[in-house]
Image (tube, grey):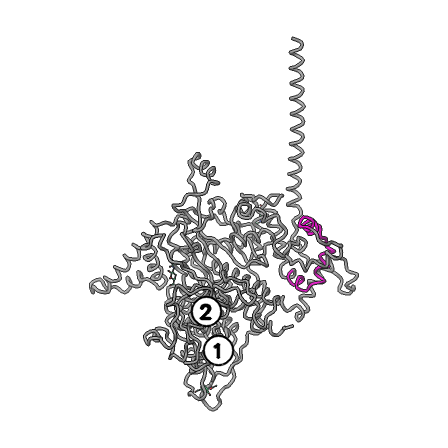
Amino acid sequence: MIYYRAIKILFVMVLATNIVYFTRTYHLRETELKQAELNHISTISYDTDDQVQFSPNKPYAELDQLEKVAYLLKSVDSDKERFWLAQTEITEPNLQINPQDFLPGANDESPNWSNKPTLFYDPRFTLSVYINEIKHQLLTKNPHNEKAKDNMITVPFAWSDWVDLTMLNEELAKPVDERADCGWLQEKVNKPTKYPDFCVNLRDLPDEELAEIGLPSKEYLPGFVVKGSPMNKAPHKQVMMQGKAHLLTHQENPLSIIFLTKDGTYEAQVAYKQRIVHSSMFSEFLSRKNIDVTGDSMVDEVILNPITEFRDLNREVKSRPLNWDDDIYKMNSITRQKSANASRELYLDPKAFDYKVEQVEEQIIEYETRLDHLKDALTNELHYDLAYIQKIKLDRHEMNHYKSLKHAYSVPLKDETTYYKLATLLKVDGNKDAGWHYEWRFFNGGLRYLKDGWTQTQLEIREQIILDRLLRNWFRFAEEKGIISWIAHGPLLSWYWDGLMFPYDIDIDIQMPSAELNRLSKHYNMTLVIEDVNDGFGKYLIDCATFLQHRDMAPKDNHIDARFIDVDTGTYIDITGLGKNEESPPQEFNSYIRNKNAKGDSVNLYSDRRKHWLTFESISPLRYSMIGGVPVYVPNDIMSMLNHEYPKGTTSYQFEDYFYVPILRLWLKRDRLQVLLDDKGLKDINLDQMTEFLKGLTVDDKVKLLETHDSVLIEYYLTHKHTQLHEIEKKFMLDPTLQYSILDLKDNYDYHQLTSNFKMGSPLRKSLYDYEYIERLKHQE
Ligand SMILES: *[C@@H]1O[C@H](CO)[C@@H](O)[C@H](O)[C@H]1NC(C)=O
Ligand SMILES: *[C@@H]1O[C@H](CO)[C@@H](O)[C@H](O)[C@H]1NC(C)=O
Ligand SMILES: *[C@@H]1O[C@H](CO)[C@@H](O)[C@H](O)[C@H]1NC(C)=O
C-alpha cells in the first residue's frame, strides 16, 4: 500500500516538474518569438542614406562613414558627366532634318526618302509626326477625347516607321537582280527547313502579292520576301534580316495605337498600310506649323521634338482616364486612392478564374446574334435604324476576337498549331544564345551577343534597360486599363531579395486570371502601346495567342497565352492565364481539397497551360508592391510559391557569378567584391564562408565598394530608396524568419501607409533609344 502511494507521489511529482518545465520553455520560446517580432517591426525606419547631413566644408577624409555614403550619393547628382548613366531623362529629343528630304514628289535624279527604296528610321520623326496628326484629328473631331468617338481618329501605319529596319538598306541599296535571296537566308542552317514556303524570292513574286504588300514596286523589297518563320537555326544576321523582311512585307498591322501618359491615354485606329513618307502626314505637319517648303523662302531645316509635341497634345486635349465601368475590379481607382490608410490590396472574385468552354460558346453566340441583327438591319429596309446599328456594331478588336474564338472552338486541343515563333540561333561565332528569348519578327540581336562596336558592359546595360522598360510599360498599361496581373516565377524571386529585378535574368513572367486574359485579348490584342513619350520612345505589341481559349494543358508549345513584346528588341513579357480546367491537380493538393470538401467550401484550384497550380487563397488578395520602382501586384502567399518553386531560392546568396550583398541590397558580380576579399585576405573560400562574409559586411565595406566602383555607386544611387522601402515591406509581409508569408494584413494600417508610397516615379534607367543611338556613342571608351 505504502509502496503504491510512493509511486503515486513520485508520478505526480514527475508530472508537475514536467509541466513547470514545459510551461517555462514554452514561455521562453514565446517571449523569444515576441521579441523577434518586436525587433522585426521596431527596426523600421524610413530614413534613407542620402538624407544624412554632412558639413560641406569638411574634407571627405574627415567625414564619418554614413556621411561618406551621403557624400558619394550626392556626387552622382552633381557630376552629371562622370555619372551620365544615372541621368535617365532623354538628353536629345531634338531631331534636325531637311524637310525636303521627306517630301514626296522629287525626281529620280535626286531621290527623297519617299521615292527611294532605302529606309529612314528615327523614332523622333515618327512620334513627332503621329502625335501632331493625332492632336489635329482630336481637336477637329473629338476634342473631349470621348471613347465613343475613338473610331474617328485614324492613321496609316507601316512597321518600317516604328521599328528600325534599316539593316535591310544594305540589300535595298543594291540593284534588284543583285539582292540576296531566300537561299542566302538558309545558307548556314542546322538543318533544312520544314517550311520551304516561308520565303519567296523577289524575282518570283507574283504581282498580286506585291499589291498586297502595299509598296510601290519591287525596288522597295529585299530579294527575300519572308512570309513566316523557317523555324530552323541560322546565324544572327540572317535571323535578324528574316524578321525585318517579314515586318517590311507580310506582318499585319496593329489594330490600334495607345499612347500612355501618367493619367490616361490617347488612342488611334490604324486604318491601312502606308509609310509616313508616302502619305501626306508630313507635309500637313509642316503646313500646320506654317513652315514653307515651296516658295522662295524655302526652309531647309526643321527641328522635330516628340516631347514638345506630346506636351502640346496634353495641353490641348486631355488624356482619357479609364471609365469607371471598364475598371471592373476597381484596380485603377484603388491604386489611385489618396488616403494613406486605405488598403491597396486587391480582393479577387473566383469568377475571374472561371473561364471555360461554356464562356467561349456564350461569346460566340453573342457575337453571332449581333452579326445577324446587323445583317438584318442592312438588308431589310423596314429594320434599318442607324442608332441601333451604331449600338451593336462590332469594332475591329471584337471582330478579330470573334474570329479567334471561332477558330479555337473548331480546333481540338491536340491539333493546336504553335502560335509563337522564336528567333532560333545557331551557336556559332562565339554566340551562346539559342534565341529562345526573342520573338522572331522583332529580333534585333541577342542580348549578350557581342555586336561590332559594342562592349560587354554596354550589352549588360542595354539588357537592364530593356527589361526595366518592359516591366514599367506593362504595369503602366495594365493600371491604366484596369487589367489585373501579378509578377510570377523569376521576377517574384528577385522581388523577394531586394525588390529589384535580377541583373542576370532575361525574362519576365506575369500571371492573370483566365477571364481577365480573355478580356485583354478582346479589347487590346494587336494594340501597339507607346511609352509615355516624356520617359522614352519604347513601343510594345500586345499579341494574344489564338488558343488561349483552350484552358487545359497545351500538348506542346502553346503554354504561354499572351505576350507583351518590345518591338525594338523582340524581348517580351510572358503572360499566362490561371484558371479552372479539366486537368487533375497534383497530389500535393490532396489535403487542401479534402479540407475544403470537409468544410463544404468550394475548391478553388487553378493552373496555367503548363504545370503551375495555385489556390485562390494563395493569390487573393493581391498585394500592392513595387519592383524596380514600378508599382506592381504580387500574390498573397508569396512564400509558399517561392518555397515550392525554388527550394533554395530564398536562402542562397549566390547565382552563377553574382552574389547578394545585403549592405547594399544589390546582386553584384564577384569581381566587384574582389577589393574586399583582398583586404580581408580571403582566398579560395567556399560558398558557406562567402555567405558569412557577405552577411558580415559593415558600413566600412559599403563605403569601400561605393568608392571603388562607379557602376556600383550608380546602381546604389538609383535603387537605394526603392530597396529600402522593400526591406520595410518585407517586415510587414513576412514573419521574422523571412520564410513565411503573413496572410492577413487587412487591418494593418502601418502596412497600408507603407503601400501608399508605391507610385510610379521616373524611370530607373535610361531610355533605350537614347542609350543605344546617342549616349553610348558619346561616351564610347
Ligand atoms: C526632295 O524633293 C523636293 C521636291 O521635289 C526637292 O525640292 C528636293 O530637292 C528633294 N530633296 C532631295 C534631297 O533630293
Ligand atoms: C490612420 O490610421 C491610424 C490608426 O488607426 C489613425 O490613428 C490615423 O488617424 C489614421 N489617419 C488617417 C488620415 O485616417
Ligand atoms: C490576336 O490577334 C492575332 C492576329 O490578328 C490573331 O491571330 C489571334 O488569334 C488573336 N488572339 C485572340 C485571342 O483573339
**Residue 739 seen anywhere in this rendered image of the structure:** yes
Q: Residue furthest top?
A: 1
Tell which circle, 1 or 2, labels the residue nearer the N-terminal end. Answer: 1
Amino acid carrying label 1: it is: Glu
Question: Mark 1 = which residue?
Answer: 170
Q: Is the CB–ligand 3 distance for label 2 below 8 Å? A: no
Question: Image quadrant of residue 231?
Answer: bottom left
Q: Compared to 224, does 731 lie above or below?
A: above
| Magenta stretch holds residue 136 | no
User: Where the C terminus falls, by quadrant?
Assistant: bottom right
- Which labelled disc corresponds to residue 550? none
Q: What predominant SS class does the magenta segment belong to?
A: helix
Residue 245 or residue 12, whichever sits in front:
245
Question: Would residue 112 be found to the left or right of residue 151 on screen?
Answer: right
Question: Image quadrant of residue 384?
Answer: bottom left
Question: Would residue 396 be found to the left or right of residue 627 on screen?
Answer: left
Residue range of the region highlighted in magenta in the rendering: 686-715
Q: Secondary structure at mark 2?
A: loop
Residue 57 or residue 693, whichever sits in front:
693
| Place of residue 634 in the rendered image (x, y in percent of width and height, measured from the top left) | 52, 51
Say how many tags the image has. Answer: 2
Q: Nearer the viewer's eye, disc 1 or disc 2? A: 1
Residue beneath the point at 52% across and 58% down? 507
| Place of residue 90 in the rendered image (x, y in percent of width and height, measured from the top left) | 57, 70
Residue 214 or residue 610, whichever sits in front:
610
Amino acid carrying label 2: it is: Val
Question: Mark 2 = which residue?
Answer: 317
| Magenta stretch holds residue 710 | yes
| Place of residue 569 in the rendered image (x, y in percent of width and height, measured from the top left) | 50, 66
